[in-house]
Amino acid sequence: MVRIAMLSFWHVHAKDYRKQALEHPQTEVVAVWDEVPERGREEASRLGVPFYDSLDEVLAQDFVDAVVVDTPTNLHPDVMIRAAEAKKHIFTEKVLALTLHDANRIIASVRAAGVQLMVSLPRLNDAYTLTFQEVVDHGLLGTISQVRVRLAHGGASDDWLPAHFYDYEQCGGGALTDLGCHPLYLTRLLLGLPDRVSAHYGRMLGKAVEDNAVSIFQYASGAIGIAETGFVSGSSPFTMEVHGMSGSAVYSQTDGSGSSVRVKSAAHGFAEWTPYPMREAKPSAFHQWVENIETGRDAAEQNEIAVDLTKLVEASNLAAVAGQPVRLTDLRP
Protein backbone atom coordinates (compact mmCIF):
# COMPACT_ATOMS: atom_id res chain seq x y z
CA MET A 1 0.00 0.00 0.00
CA VAL A 2 1.32 3.44 -0.98
CA ARG A 3 0.52 5.96 1.76
CA ILE A 4 0.03 9.46 0.39
CA ALA A 5 0.16 12.97 1.82
CA MET A 6 -1.78 15.56 -0.16
CA LEU A 7 0.36 18.68 -0.44
CA SER A 8 -2.07 21.56 -1.05
CA PHE A 9 -5.46 21.89 -2.69
CA TRP A 10 -4.58 25.06 -4.59
CA HIS A 11 -5.00 23.62 -8.08
CA VAL A 12 -8.44 22.89 -9.51
CA HIS A 13 -7.39 19.28 -10.21
CA ALA A 14 -6.34 18.54 -6.61
CA LYS A 15 -9.72 17.01 -5.81
CA ASP A 16 -9.48 14.82 -8.91
CA TYR A 17 -6.19 13.39 -7.66
CA ARG A 18 -7.64 12.98 -4.19
CA LYS A 19 -10.43 10.94 -5.76
CA GLN A 20 -7.94 8.79 -7.67
CA ALA A 21 -5.92 8.20 -4.51
CA LEU A 22 -9.03 7.15 -2.59
CA GLU A 23 -10.26 4.84 -5.34
CA HIS A 24 -6.98 3.13 -6.24
CA PRO A 25 -6.75 -0.23 -4.45
CA GLN A 26 -3.06 0.24 -3.66
CA THR A 27 -3.11 3.79 -2.28
CA GLU A 28 -4.53 5.62 0.70
CA VAL A 29 -4.46 9.26 1.81
CA VAL A 30 -2.91 9.55 5.27
CA ALA A 31 -2.10 13.24 5.74
CA VAL A 32 -2.62 16.77 4.41
CA TRP A 33 -0.46 19.88 4.29
CA ASP A 34 -1.49 23.12 2.64
CA GLU A 35 0.15 26.54 2.32
CA VAL A 36 -3.31 27.90 3.23
CA PRO A 37 -3.90 26.22 6.62
CA GLU A 38 -7.66 26.85 6.71
CA ARG A 39 -8.15 25.08 3.40
CA GLY A 40 -5.88 22.24 4.44
CA ARG A 41 -7.65 21.68 7.76
CA GLU A 42 -11.01 21.55 5.98
CA GLU A 43 -9.74 18.94 3.51
CA ALA A 44 -8.05 16.90 6.24
CA SER A 45 -11.26 16.90 8.26
CA ARG A 46 -13.20 15.74 5.22
CA LEU A 47 -10.71 12.89 4.73
CA GLY A 48 -10.44 12.03 8.42
CA VAL A 49 -6.64 12.35 8.41
CA PRO A 50 -4.23 14.63 10.30
CA PHE A 51 -3.36 18.09 9.02
CA TYR A 52 0.20 19.37 9.37
CA ASP A 53 1.04 23.08 9.55
CA SER A 54 4.67 22.33 8.75
CA LEU A 55 5.78 20.87 5.42
CA ASP A 56 8.95 19.54 7.03
CA GLU A 57 6.91 17.80 9.70
CA VAL A 58 4.62 15.96 7.29
CA LEU A 59 7.60 14.94 5.14
CA ALA A 60 9.32 13.57 8.25
CA GLN A 61 6.52 11.09 8.96
CA ASP A 62 7.52 7.47 8.42
CA PHE A 63 3.94 6.55 7.54
CA VAL A 64 4.06 8.83 4.47
CA ASP A 65 5.51 7.08 1.41
CA ALA A 66 4.56 9.55 -1.29
CA VAL A 67 3.09 12.97 -1.96
CA VAL A 68 0.67 14.52 -4.43
CA VAL A 69 1.69 18.12 -5.15
CA ASP A 70 -0.98 20.67 -6.06
CA THR A 71 0.64 23.81 -4.70
CA PRO A 72 0.91 27.13 -6.54
CA THR A 73 3.27 26.56 -9.45
CA ASN A 74 5.91 28.93 -8.09
CA LEU A 75 6.27 26.65 -5.02
CA HIS A 76 6.91 23.48 -7.05
CA PRO A 77 10.74 23.53 -6.91
CA ASP A 78 10.97 24.06 -3.15
CA VAL A 79 8.22 21.59 -2.27
CA MET A 80 9.36 18.83 -4.61
CA ILE A 81 13.04 19.11 -3.81
CA ARG A 82 12.24 18.87 -0.09
CA ALA A 83 9.94 15.90 -0.75
CA ALA A 84 12.64 14.12 -2.75
CA GLU A 85 15.23 14.76 -0.06
CA ALA A 86 12.79 13.19 2.41
CA LYS A 87 12.67 10.09 0.14
CA LYS A 88 9.02 10.57 -0.82
CA HIS A 89 7.72 9.58 -4.24
CA ILE A 90 6.13 12.50 -6.08
CA PHE A 91 3.04 12.91 -8.24
CA THR A 92 2.55 16.50 -9.36
CA GLU A 93 0.22 18.68 -11.33
CA LYS A 94 1.79 20.21 -14.43
CA VAL A 95 3.82 22.23 -15.15
CA LEU A 96 6.85 20.65 -13.41
CA ALA A 97 8.46 24.08 -13.00
CA LEU A 98 8.30 27.49 -14.64
CA THR A 99 11.94 27.48 -15.79
CA LEU A 100 14.27 24.87 -17.21
CA HIS A 101 16.75 25.64 -14.45
CA ASP A 102 14.24 24.78 -11.74
CA ALA A 103 12.98 21.72 -13.62
CA ASN A 104 16.55 20.41 -13.83
CA ARG A 105 17.01 21.02 -10.10
CA ILE A 106 13.91 18.95 -9.34
CA ILE A 107 14.99 16.11 -11.63
CA ALA A 108 18.46 16.07 -10.08
CA SER A 109 16.96 15.81 -6.58
CA VAL A 110 14.63 13.00 -7.65
CA ARG A 111 17.46 11.03 -9.21
CA ALA A 112 19.74 11.54 -6.23
CA ALA A 113 17.02 10.32 -3.87
CA GLY A 114 16.01 7.36 -6.04
CA VAL A 115 12.30 8.19 -5.82
CA GLN A 116 9.59 8.03 -8.48
CA LEU A 117 8.35 11.24 -10.12
CA MET A 118 5.26 11.47 -12.31
CA VAL A 119 3.97 14.73 -13.81
CA SER A 120 0.30 14.73 -14.72
CA LEU A 121 0.27 14.94 -18.53
CA PRO A 122 -2.96 13.00 -19.02
CA ARG A 123 -3.42 13.39 -22.77
CA LEU A 124 -0.26 11.40 -23.42
CA ASN A 125 -2.30 8.34 -22.45
CA ASP A 126 -5.48 9.01 -24.42
CA ALA A 127 -6.52 6.81 -27.33
CA TYR A 128 -6.43 9.60 -29.92
CA THR A 129 -2.85 10.53 -28.99
CA LEU A 130 -1.64 6.95 -29.32
CA THR A 131 -3.50 6.67 -32.62
CA PHE A 132 -1.85 9.81 -34.01
CA GLN A 133 1.53 8.39 -32.99
CA GLU A 134 0.81 5.16 -34.86
CA VAL A 135 -0.33 7.01 -37.99
CA VAL A 136 2.85 9.12 -37.97
CA ASP A 137 5.16 6.22 -37.08
CA HIS A 138 3.74 4.10 -39.92
CA GLY A 139 4.57 6.88 -42.37
CA LEU A 140 1.00 7.30 -43.59
CA LEU A 141 1.35 11.07 -43.82
CA GLY A 142 4.88 11.23 -45.18
CA THR A 143 7.22 13.91 -43.85
CA ILE A 144 5.31 15.94 -41.26
CA SER A 145 5.01 19.60 -42.18
CA GLN A 146 2.62 20.95 -39.54
CA VAL A 147 0.98 19.97 -36.26
CA ARG A 148 -1.82 22.05 -34.73
CA VAL A 149 -3.40 21.38 -31.34
CA ARG A 150 -6.11 23.53 -29.77
CA LEU A 151 -7.50 23.22 -26.24
CA ALA A 152 -9.47 26.09 -24.76
CA HIS A 153 -12.42 26.69 -22.44
CA GLY A 154 -14.42 29.54 -20.97
CA GLY A 155 -13.03 29.37 -17.45
CA ALA A 156 -12.40 33.12 -17.34
CA SER A 157 -15.25 34.36 -19.53
CA ASP A 158 -17.72 32.11 -17.71
CA ASP A 159 -16.11 32.97 -14.36
CA TRP A 160 -15.60 29.46 -12.94
CA LEU A 161 -11.83 29.46 -12.50
CA PRO A 162 -10.63 30.46 -9.01
CA ALA A 163 -9.31 34.01 -8.64
CA HIS A 164 -5.82 32.78 -7.79
CA PHE A 165 -5.47 31.36 -11.31
CA TYR A 166 -4.91 34.97 -12.41
CA ASP A 167 -2.19 35.64 -9.82
CA TYR A 168 1.02 36.05 -11.82
CA GLU A 169 3.33 35.42 -8.85
CA GLN A 170 1.71 32.10 -7.99
CA CYS A 171 1.02 30.91 -11.54
CA GLY A 172 3.94 32.34 -13.49
CA GLY A 173 1.56 32.88 -16.39
CA GLY A 174 -2.01 32.37 -17.46
CA ALA A 175 -3.78 30.22 -20.03
CA LEU A 176 -0.58 29.14 -21.81
CA THR A 177 1.20 28.09 -18.61
CA ASP A 178 -1.81 26.11 -17.37
CA LEU A 179 -4.23 24.78 -19.98
CA GLY A 180 -1.80 25.40 -22.82
CA CYS A 181 0.51 22.74 -21.44
CA HIS A 182 -1.57 20.07 -23.19
CA PRO A 183 -1.25 21.48 -26.73
CA LEU A 184 2.43 22.16 -26.05
CA TYR A 185 3.40 18.63 -25.02
CA LEU A 186 1.21 17.00 -27.67
CA THR A 187 2.80 19.10 -30.41
CA ARG A 188 6.24 18.25 -29.04
CA LEU A 189 5.30 14.56 -28.93
CA LEU A 190 4.58 14.47 -32.66
CA LEU A 191 7.16 16.96 -33.96
CA GLY A 192 9.90 16.91 -31.34
CA LEU A 193 11.45 20.00 -29.79
CA PRO A 194 11.64 23.06 -32.04
CA ASP A 195 14.63 25.30 -32.61
CA ARG A 196 12.71 28.48 -31.84
CA VAL A 197 9.43 29.44 -30.21
CA SER A 198 7.26 32.49 -30.87
CA ALA A 199 4.18 33.36 -28.82
CA HIS A 200 1.36 35.87 -28.83
CA TYR A 201 -0.78 36.51 -25.75
CA GLY A 202 -4.06 38.36 -25.32
CA ARG A 203 -5.72 39.74 -22.19
CA MET A 204 -9.34 40.07 -23.20
CA LEU A 205 -10.68 40.42 -19.65
CA GLY A 206 -7.92 42.63 -18.28
CA LYS A 207 -6.42 40.02 -15.96
CA ALA A 208 -2.81 40.12 -14.77
CA VAL A 209 -2.11 37.05 -16.93
CA GLU A 210 -3.05 36.09 -20.49
CA ASP A 211 -6.43 34.51 -21.16
CA ASN A 212 -5.88 33.90 -24.89
CA ALA A 213 -2.66 32.51 -26.37
CA VAL A 214 -0.89 30.84 -29.25
CA SER A 215 2.63 29.41 -29.32
CA ILE A 216 4.33 28.70 -32.64
CA PHE A 217 7.20 26.23 -32.99
CA GLN A 218 9.78 26.75 -35.74
CA TYR A 219 11.96 23.86 -36.94
CA ALA A 220 15.13 23.81 -39.02
CA SER A 221 13.34 21.42 -41.39
CA GLY A 222 10.73 24.07 -42.16
CA ALA A 223 8.01 22.29 -40.19
CA ILE A 224 5.72 24.35 -37.97
CA GLY A 225 3.92 23.51 -34.73
CA ILE A 226 0.94 25.51 -33.48
CA ALA A 227 -0.35 25.26 -29.90
CA GLU A 228 -3.52 27.25 -29.16
CA THR A 229 -5.26 27.79 -25.85
CA GLY A 230 -7.43 30.18 -23.88
CA PHE A 231 -9.77 30.79 -20.98
CA VAL A 232 -12.25 32.79 -23.10
CA SER A 233 -13.67 30.21 -25.53
CA GLY A 234 -16.91 28.82 -24.19
CA SER A 235 -17.57 26.19 -26.86
CA SER A 236 -14.17 25.49 -28.39
CA PRO A 237 -13.70 21.78 -29.20
CA PHE A 238 -10.42 20.03 -28.48
CA THR A 239 -8.77 19.66 -31.87
CA MET A 240 -5.65 17.97 -33.24
CA GLU A 241 -4.39 18.16 -36.81
CA VAL A 242 -1.27 16.54 -38.25
CA HIS A 243 -0.36 17.38 -41.83
CA GLY A 244 2.33 15.73 -43.91
CA MET A 245 3.55 15.78 -47.48
CA SER A 246 1.53 12.63 -48.26
CA GLY A 247 -1.60 13.13 -46.18
CA SER A 248 -3.35 14.50 -43.12
CA ALA A 249 -4.93 13.22 -39.92
CA VAL A 250 -7.50 15.14 -37.87
CA TYR A 251 -9.40 14.72 -34.63
CA SER A 252 -12.01 17.03 -33.14
CA GLN A 253 -14.52 16.66 -30.34
CA THR A 254 -17.16 18.68 -32.16
CA ASP A 255 -19.75 15.96 -31.64
CA GLY A 256 -19.02 15.76 -27.92
CA SER A 257 -17.37 12.37 -28.17
CA GLY A 258 -14.38 12.60 -30.47
CA SER A 259 -14.86 9.03 -31.60
CA SER A 260 -12.15 8.74 -34.24
CA VAL A 261 -8.97 10.04 -35.82
CA ARG A 262 -9.69 10.53 -39.52
CA VAL A 263 -6.98 10.04 -42.12
CA LYS A 264 -6.72 11.09 -45.75
CA SER A 265 -3.66 9.82 -47.62
CA ALA A 266 -4.24 8.68 -51.19
CA ALA A 267 -0.70 7.33 -51.47
CA HIS A 268 -1.41 4.88 -48.65
CA GLY A 269 -4.93 3.72 -49.51
CA PHE A 270 -6.94 6.45 -47.78
CA ALA A 271 -8.35 8.28 -50.81
CA GLU A 272 -11.19 9.78 -48.74
CA TRP A 273 -11.40 10.84 -45.10
CA THR A 274 -11.41 7.51 -43.29
CA PRO A 275 -11.71 6.68 -39.56
CA TYR A 276 -8.48 5.04 -38.44
CA PRO A 277 -8.69 2.17 -35.91
CA MET A 278 -8.29 3.72 -32.47
CA ARG A 279 -5.56 2.47 -30.18
CA GLU A 280 -6.46 1.45 -26.64
CA ALA A 281 -5.80 4.15 -24.06
CA LYS A 282 -3.05 3.64 -21.50
CA PRO A 283 -3.70 3.65 -17.75
CA SER A 284 -3.83 7.09 -16.15
CA ALA A 285 -0.67 8.89 -15.07
CA PHE A 286 -1.64 8.23 -11.44
CA HIS A 287 -1.97 4.48 -12.06
CA GLN A 288 1.36 4.43 -13.88
CA TRP A 289 3.00 6.24 -10.97
CA VAL A 290 1.73 3.71 -8.44
CA GLU A 291 2.89 0.84 -10.64
CA ASN A 292 6.31 2.47 -10.99
CA ILE A 293 6.60 2.73 -7.21
CA GLU A 294 5.67 -0.92 -6.78
CA THR A 295 7.85 -2.30 -9.59
CA GLY A 296 10.72 0.17 -9.76
CA ARG A 297 10.00 0.82 -13.43
CA ASP A 298 11.81 3.87 -14.80
CA ALA A 299 9.74 6.95 -15.73
CA ALA A 300 12.65 8.67 -17.49
CA GLU A 301 10.80 9.12 -20.80
CA GLN A 302 7.77 10.72 -19.16
CA ASN A 303 10.03 12.93 -17.04
CA GLU A 304 11.90 14.01 -20.18
CA ILE A 305 8.63 15.10 -21.78
CA ALA A 306 7.79 17.03 -18.60
CA VAL A 307 11.13 18.86 -18.71
CA ASP A 308 10.65 19.60 -22.41
CA LEU A 309 7.22 21.02 -21.57
CA THR A 310 8.87 23.42 -19.12
CA LYS A 311 11.27 24.49 -21.89
CA LEU A 312 8.32 25.27 -24.15
CA VAL A 313 6.42 27.16 -21.44
CA GLU A 314 9.46 29.22 -20.47
CA ALA A 315 10.33 29.99 -24.09
CA SER A 316 6.72 30.93 -24.88
CA ASN A 317 6.50 33.28 -21.91
CA LEU A 318 9.82 34.92 -22.80
CA ALA A 319 8.87 35.22 -26.48
CA ALA A 320 5.51 36.82 -25.68
CA VAL A 321 7.22 39.49 -23.59
CA ALA A 322 10.07 40.08 -26.03
CA GLY A 323 7.89 40.09 -29.11
CA GLN A 324 10.38 37.91 -30.95
CA PRO A 325 11.31 34.22 -31.19
CA VAL A 326 13.31 32.56 -28.42
CA ARG A 327 15.78 29.76 -29.09
CA LEU A 328 15.53 26.83 -26.68
CA THR A 329 19.33 26.70 -26.54
CA ASP A 330 19.28 30.17 -24.97
CA LEU A 331 17.37 28.98 -21.88
CA ARG A 332 19.38 28.71 -18.67
CA PRO A 333 19.99 25.00 -17.99
Image: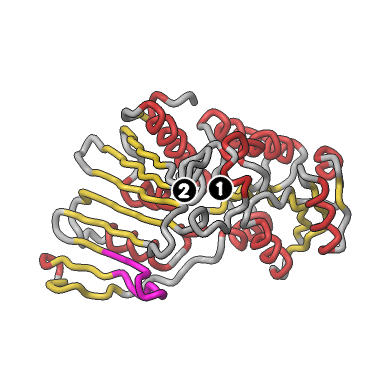
CA separation, marks 2 and 1?
8 Å
Q: Badge 2 local density, few (<14 within 10 Å), some, or many (20+)?
A: many
Residue 193, image x, y percentages:
36, 40
Query: As drawn, is 210 to the left or to the right of 5?
Result: left
Question: Does the magenta segment cover residue 64?
Answer: no
Query: As drawn, is 21 to the left or to the right of 332?
Result: right
Query: Magenta region, mostly helix, strand or loop?
Result: loop
Residue 298 versus residue 67: which sits nearer the camera? 67
Q: Badge 1 local density, few (<14 within 10 Å), some, or many (20+)?
A: many
Residue 51, image x, y percentages:
86, 51
Residue 84 versus residue 296: which sits nearer the camera? 84
Residue 265, image x, y percentages:
15, 66
Secondary structure type for disc 1:
loop
Above or below, 202 relative to 243: above
Q: Which amino acid does label 1 sit on?
A: Lys
Residue where numbered disc 1 is placed: 94
Q: What residue type is labelled 2?
A: Cys
Question: Does the magenta segment cover residue 252?
Answer: yes
Residue 128, image x, y percentages:
38, 66
Residue span colored magenta: 250-261
Secondary structure type for disc 2:
helix
Q: How many labels does the image show?
A: 2
Q: Can I make out residue 304 in this image? A: no
Residue where numbered disc 2 is placed: 181
The earlier-in-sequence mark between 2 and 1 is 1
Seen at 57% across and 43% down, the residue is 166
Residue 205 versus residue 85: which sits nearer the camera? 205
Above or below, 301 relative to 81: below
Seen at 77% across and 45% down, the residue is 36
Q: Do the residues labelled 2 and 1 touch (CB within 8 Å)?
A: yes
